[in-house]
Image (cartoon, grey):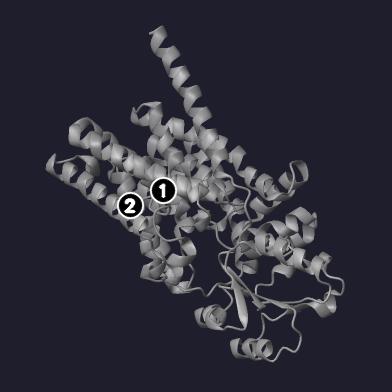
């Protein structure tokens, strides 16, 4: 018995160290994305009023207050801002171990929760999605994995986690669908406990009402639209294919021509492996659905609600907005893999193949430059260097990099009013006319893929009078030959 306990402690220590090494490996310190800049610019400035206005506009006050504290204590470089996720990785580790223990699995299964490309991808972002992931793991544990779901202690913990999660990101609010669905399934057998659920939620209701009022008052509307592409991208990401397919920007833009042979080959391997796993389980008459009935029904309810809401209000919906149900997917995935491992030699081969593909996808996400888009940092450094070399240079910018609040090349200009021109409000034809009629020889035009059409983005490619530098991914730098 003593040897078993000692072995368990060793496994716990090794898994913890490996998970934190994976987390650190995921943080590249590359350029911040545009949405990261929008979130961190005000907090790192120390302006509490501006921070709260922005925070309520994004409905993420908890996160922005946390980043304000973190940036002043730890620092505000790209790497350090992303390291702000690490304390919440610790929270995630605690609840993953609890979940794994509740299922009777070896602690080594906890690694699946952290080698998944979704985790690796968002570890390298100064955004609240790893925090949402940590709170979601806790919420899912208290909802599905504890023996006394309706105990007062468990319901208080559920409400505390829910309140904190919604305070950090309003999209966490949708996770309540899991709780309500599970209540419907369980309380049919425990009707006497209904009042306990209602009473404890009523105690927390003043805080919920305050947050709801603030979010409804300040939340910025979005018109990015929603459709089948959003649903397919959620599936694609949850299955772990992010690192072997197109980048997020190329996928959203439908740039299928950008796909290379190795991506096609790995995607086919992914699909064949998943089909093989499904075939093994069907042939063995798996009891997976019966074992996970409450989680599966609750997840279907979650997706139905969030997809309907997204369609009704034209809300842009991507995989990160479904992060709160991601732990449920991972538990079900581990359950499937655990079952096929015990079925046969073929099951062990399929498990190994899927885990290796998942690991490859995660490594590519973390380390291939192709998946690191919107290189604000690279463009800023390049333009700053050119301005220092040539005081006569004029910069025309469609990306509004200089106004981001984090990256700026303004300090390198001798005469910023004359040299720095914001053309983001001009039509594409006006930009073309401006460049073609430019009487000065020295200029830099910054084209940002998300602010201009694909036509303008590629307009200068075949023009002999211009040189196009596309090394900054979503940006193109146009200069005269």
Residue at point 39%, 61% (across, down):
233
Residue at point 22%, 50% (across, down):
275
Residue 461 appears at what percent x and percent y? 54, 78
Residue 17 in view here: yes
Residue 361 has which mark?
1
Q: Nearer the viewer, residue 139 or 330?
A: 330
Q: Nearer the viewer, residue 247 or 473?
A: 473
Residue 340 in view here: no
Residue at point 66%, 60% (across, down):
378
In the rendered image, which residue does mark 2 sit on?
Answer: 266
Q: Nearer the viewer, residue 376 or 157?
A: 376
Element at badge 2?
Answer: helix
Figure quadrant of residue 254? bottom left
**Is 138 located above or below residue 419 in the figure?**
above
Badge 2 crowding class, 10 Å Cα cut-off, few under 14, some 14 to 19, many 20 or more, is some
Residue 477 placement, left or right of 440: left
Spatial separation of the CA atoms under disc 1 and disc 2:
9 Å
Q: How many marks?
A: 2
**Is 424 located above or below residue 85 in the figure?**
below
């Amino acid at each position: 018995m003593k040897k078993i306990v000692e072995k368990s402690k060793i496994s716990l220590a090794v898994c913890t160290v490996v998970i934190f090494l994976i987390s650190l490996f995921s943080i590249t310190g590359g350029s911040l994305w545009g949405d990261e800049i929008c979130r961190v610019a005000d907090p790192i400035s120390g302006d509490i009023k501006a921070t709260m206005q922005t925070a309520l506009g994004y409905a993420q006050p908890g996160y922005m207050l946390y980043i304000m504290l973190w940036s002043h204590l730890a620092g505000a470089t790209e790497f350090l801002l992303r390291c702000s996720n690490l304390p919440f990785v610790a929270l995630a580790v605690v609840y993953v171990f609890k979940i794994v223990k509740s299922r009777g699995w070896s602690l080594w299964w906890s690694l699946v929760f952290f080698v998944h490309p979704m985790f690796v991808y968002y570890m390298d972002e100064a955004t609240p999605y790893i925090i949402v992931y940590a709170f979601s793991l806790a919420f899912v544990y208290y909802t599905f994995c504890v023996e006394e779901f309706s105990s007062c202690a468990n319901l208080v913990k559920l409400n505390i986690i829910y309140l904190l999660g919604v305070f950090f990101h309003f999209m966490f609010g949708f996770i309540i669908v899991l709780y309500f669905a599970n209540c419907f399934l369980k309380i049919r057998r425990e009707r006497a406990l209904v009042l306990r659920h209602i009473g404890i939620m009523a105690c927390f209701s003043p805080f919920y009402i305050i947050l709801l009022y603030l979010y409804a008052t300040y939340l910025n509307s979005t018109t990015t639209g929603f459709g089948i592409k959003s649903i397919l991208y959620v599936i694609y990401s949850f299955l772990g294919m992010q690192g072997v397919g197109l980048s997020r920007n190329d996928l959203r833009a439908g740039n299928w021509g950008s796909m290379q042979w190795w991506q096609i080959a790995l995607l086919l391997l992914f699909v064949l492996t998943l089909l093989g796993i499904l075939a093994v389980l069907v042939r063995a008459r798996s009891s997976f659905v019966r074992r996970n009935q409450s989680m599966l029904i609750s997840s279907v309810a979650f997706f139905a609600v969030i997809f309907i809401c997204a369609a009704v209000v034209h809300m842009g919906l991507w995989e990160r907005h479904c992060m709160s149900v991601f732990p449920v997917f991972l538990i079900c995935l581990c359950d499937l893999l655990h079952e096929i491992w015990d079925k046969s030699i073929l099951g062990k081969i399929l498990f190994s193949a899927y885990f290796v593909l998942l690991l490859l996808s995660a490594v590519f996400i973390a380390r291939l430059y192709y998946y690191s888009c919107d290189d604000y940092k690279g463009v800023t450094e390049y333009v700053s260097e050119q301005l220092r070399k040539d005081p006569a240079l004029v910069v025309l910018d469609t990306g509004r990099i200089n106004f981001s609040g984090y990256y700026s090349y303004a300090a390198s200009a001798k005469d910023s009013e004359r040299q720095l021109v914001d053309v983001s409000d001009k039509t594409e034809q006006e930009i073309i006319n401006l460049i073609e009629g430019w009487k000065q020889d020295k200029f830099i035009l910054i084209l940002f893929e998300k602010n201009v059409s694909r036509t303008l983005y590629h307009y200068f490619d075949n023009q002999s009078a211009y040189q196009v530098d596309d090394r900054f991914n979503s940006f193109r730098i146009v200069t005269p030959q």
